[in-house]
Image: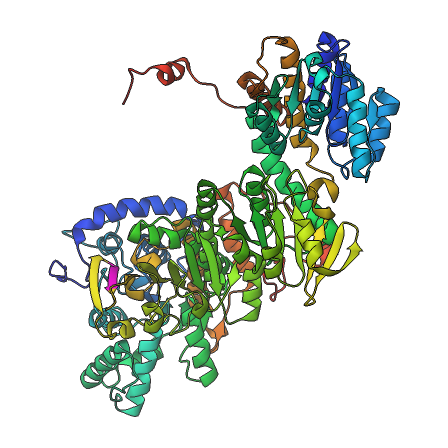
Amino acid sequence: MLRSIRERFARERPFDGLRVGVCLHVTTETASLVRTLIAGGAQVALCAANPLDTQDDVAAALVERDSAAVHAIHGEDMATYYRHIEAVLDTRPQLTMDDGADLVSTLHASRPQALGDILGGTEETTSGVVRLRALEAAGQLGFPVVAVNDARTKRLFDNRYGTGQSALDGILRATNMLLAGRVVVVFGYGWCGQGIALRAKGAGAHVVVCEVDPVRALEAKLEGYEVLPGVAAAAKGDIFITATGNRDVVRREHFEAMRDGAVLCNAGHFDVECDLAALRELAVERQQVRPHVEQHVLADGRRINLLAEGRVVNLAAAEGNPAAVMDMSFANQALAAEHLVKTAGTLDARVHGVPPEIDDEVARLTLAALDVEIDALTEKQREYLTAWEQGT
Amino acid sequence: MTALSSTTDFKVADLSLADFGRKEIRLAEHEMPGLMSIREEFAARQPLKGARIMGSLHMTIQTAVLIETLVALGAEVRWVSCNIFSTQDHAAAAVAVGPDGTPEDPRGVPVFAWKGETLEEYWWCTEQALTWPGEDGPNMILDDGGDATLLVHKGTEFEAAGAVPDDAPGDSEEYGVILALLRKTLAEDPQKWTKVGQGIKGVTEETTTGVHRLYEMMDAGTLLFPAINVNDSVTKSKFDNLYGCRHSLVDGINRATDVMIGGKVAVICGFGDVGKGCAESLRGQGARVIVTEIDPICALQAAMQGYEVKTLEDVIDEGDIFVTTTGNKDIITADHMARMKHQAIVGNIGHFDNEIDIAGLAKVPGIERINIKPQVDEWKFADGHTIIMLSEGRLLNLGNATGHPSFVMSNSFSNQTIAQIELFTKNDEYERKVYVLPKHLDEKVARLHLDALGVRLTKLTPEQAAYIGVPVEGPYKPDHYRY
């Protein structure tokens, strides 16, 4: 799908000469998106959205073949990570593309004078949208942002089916555990949590869901999952996965209840979902037992295995979401960026949804790629749906 | 049961239901491609000509198609249901009237069955079906659960002893009824069952429970005639028990209670073929399923499929729905039920009603039984909490719904028909033992059902067949293969 958009962009050049600052996980799928923007005439500077997510070969290829300015190294420290963000901002982008809103928040914090140059931005993920809405609520958001995450063709697919599959992939690659017969505890039953629970159940695990939202909790319950408070689940689980977008979801009281050999990981965007400081405090010994598996030995001998330092496990320990769903997400990114350019100057400095036409277009293109045909409403049906006079 | 027609040699609830029954039989025939193609294949040869088959098997629409298949192959047939609640009265009426008769002029098969028999009526029916008019008795039994076989064996045993034993304190109510019946027949004809037993060439047995009885008799040396264990045909137990229950368990629970299954905690006792189907059935509706098992292999299977495996004691106050599938007795006791949640649903899908202790329940001090509708009772304990009992602990898929669907029963009954032909036509090849059908017949039954589902089978090349050492046309698996 991105390829077909790229071909159109190459003809229409919607970004001709435009400077675009991109802060996304540096993976092959992101490379496709960057090449699509370049095909549309953009000058792209790219940095990573997470210190552990960069695929170095992809970064190199983007520099060599596509003349993108890339600032990203797998395993970079936090200082380097932020230096790379600053390097992208140094190019004075006119359009931003974010995953987690680090680029936009750094911009607002350190270069308020540059806000006026910016046409708009796009945001990829739930956690970033939450930050941007907070910025908007504080009256400080300096330009319009399109929340790509909120497109139906993004979160229903990328978050649910993409993260559902890839988070388990990360756990399997890191631990080589058998899921069948295990108790998998999923914290958060949003789109990501639903996907993880679904795939874990499919692999034969007994799934327990922990929630704070009563509607989500009820959904999980009627789907047939066991719903428990976190501490009760902690005593029961073999594998714990956080997918909440919130902080300190798994903390001291949970670690204290966990069984020997528990595996702990995070599928949410930031590494704040597990209280790692508390875990380190409880541990009398820590050792790296496999790549991406750090074992914490507690005073009574129980071992808790933390995966990927509590960072997003699908990207850190596996390859992130599969290309097929990222294609949908990034098609939204590309089309949302085009939308921002076309509507330049007319949108308020707020967080906007993806226009429904773009959402529908992405779904239509994906269906075509999958060789799926669907029906269309008849004229009479269309009329019926819009007429208030017609009832039974 | 005042409306019973009993003027001629049959007894059903209401002959006027025959027309409805005939319509449903016609629909079922389309869904039973195995039985119908067997009819076609053997109609000209009449392999069951001379066979006098007494059948004791749930008198449902599907069974009607089986009965008429046996008749089409030349057999004379008399029939009873093998459970007091499992008869579909329109099916019984249609069979009694027959395809060519009318309610005023019934010309079908003598059938003695109605929904809601008493235990006395049930065993009276079994006796009637085993009692052929004229000199000859039945020469074949088609059994489900082994009740007909049991009556012949017990009758023969007591006639040899010259007396029927007195009721013993530990006996079930039902055994008391059997003993009373045998006392009566011993007085009327001291050789009745001995003669019946001598006339019988063999029995084909439908279900796990009946098969278990047969192997016990074989081991004890008391088996009077050869038996074919139809239950352990792959196309029976791996289909009927599994996919049949997967379909009919939730059907029974829904029709009985209309309770929302999603979100409930369901406890399945036993994870054999039936338990596996039941667990999948409830999980598919969104229930969280917990399994209880005594067999470590089945318990591990359940765990690997993501079910929790607990003891019943662990979860007795947690379950919303309890289903027994074990083929064993005393699984859910009155004490268990006293500790269940308010309005917990309790039911059994195993063959006999001894998995749940109904007699014990009735004896709990202060208990009250509130009938909600046929086959659904609320039992109220002295503390005010209640449980909902389905079909009085008898198999709820037949008691509360219509049992297994036609398609799956076509597999089971194709095996039955083939087994009847086999035992009747090659009787001298069989000793007084229990046999299973050879694998090529099992594969044939499966083959007969593929077209109806649009299944396209891949064919082995001769080179491939040689490579794995099987004939191109099968059988494809060794006898010990578990599927």
Residue at horizontal 73%, vertical 55%?
Answer: B466
Instruction: Count how many numbered circles sit on residues in the image.
Output: 0
Q: Quadrant of the N terminus of chain A?
A: top right
The residue furthest right is: A64
The image shows residue A13 at horizontal and vertical percentages of: 73, 9
- The colour scheme used to paint the residues is rainbow
Looking at the image, which is closer to me, A239 or B156? A239
Q: Is residue B291 left or right of residue A19?
A: left
The image shows residue A116 at horizontal and vertical percentages of: 68, 12
Residue at horizontal 48%, vertical 53%?
Answer: B280
Q: Quadrant of residue A89?
A: top right
The residues colored magenta run: B375-379
Q: Quadrant of the C terminus of chain A?
A: top left
The residue furthest left is: B2
The image shows residue A309 at horizontal and vertical percentages of: 73, 47
Q: Vertical placement of B33 versus B439: above or below?
A: above
Q: Quadrant of residue B300?
A: bottom right
Looking at the image, which is closer to me, A60 or A85? A85
Residue B390 visible from this viewpoint: no
Residue B382 visible from this viewpoint: yes
Asked if residue B332 is among those painted magenta in the image, a careful observer would answer no
The image shows residue A111 at horizontal and vertical percentages of: 73, 21
